[in-house]
Image: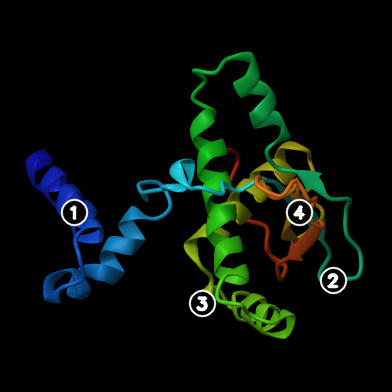
Amino acid sequence: MVGLTISIHFGLIISTLLPHNAVSSAVAPAARRWVDPVFSQDWRLFAPKPENSDVRILARGVDRTGHQHTQWLDVNTSLVIAIRRNPLSPLALPEILSAKCALVLLSTLINGHRTEQQRQELIKQWGDPGRKPPELIALERAGSSLLRTRRVTHYPRMQIALHVIGLGNATKGRPQPAFLVVFEPALLANVTAL
């Protein structure tokens, strides 16, 4: 059984790395669900113009009407502090996973030269649980966990936002404007910890 699982794992990984052909196209949806976001290949380290921004993952509690809410809470602050104290901490995995999820969502929203209206329509579509990307589900679970540890349980819904602070283009040195991407409110997930 373990051998079969390992074979399937490596088969799915290899199918995402090979050039497009009939086999890789047939298994592409299953392979993407398995590979992203944990096992995905990321070549930005070797890019001539590496990304130079700070992405904060924020969460807040929201009432049923959507009119009352808590202040925004930074999801990763406690994880980052724990990792800086102990770089070999097992808490590094949720931090890496949530950062990759945020980057995948941002690249989906920003790349492709979408207009602001197209981005808002996509965010609204993702409010439907059947169309919600797994990366957003993972961030909502992390946000729910934070709200529950902070005892913000009287709000039945929660909302995730990504605050991107452009630190400047690595080659030009010009600062980039900051922006906030706010997702549709979702039910507070029933989780206690990541």
Q: Residue at x 54, y 28 (%)?
A: 91
Q: Is residue 62 left or right of residue 57?
A: right
Q: Earlier in the sequence, mark 3 or mark 2?
A: 2
In this rendered view, identify the residue nearer to me: 113 or 149.
113
Q: Earlier in the sequence, mark 1 or mark 2?
A: 1
Q: Which residue is label 4 attached to? A: 163
Tell me which amino acid carries mark 3: Arg
**Separation of residues labelled 2 and 4 (CA atoms):** 20 Å
Q: Residue at x 44, y 42 (%)?
A: 46
- SS class, disc 4: strand
**Crowdedness of circle 1 by 10 Å Cα count: few (<14), some, many (20+)?**
few
Tell me which amino acid carries mark 4: His
Vertically, is 39 above or below 64?
above
Foreground disc of the pair 3, 2? 3
Q: Which residue is label 3 attached to? A: 131
Residue 35 image-quadrant placement: bottom left
Q: Earlier in the sequence, mark 2 or mark 4?
A: 2
**Separation of residues labelled 3 and 4 (CA atoms):** 23 Å
Tell me which amino acid carries mark 1: Ile
Tell me which amino acid carries mark 2: Gly
Q: Residue 84, percent across and down?
A: 64, 19
Q: Residue 139, percent across and down?
A: 60, 53
**Crowdedness of circle 3 by 10 Å Cα count: few (<14), some, many (20+)?**
few
Numbered mark located on residue 14 in the image: 1
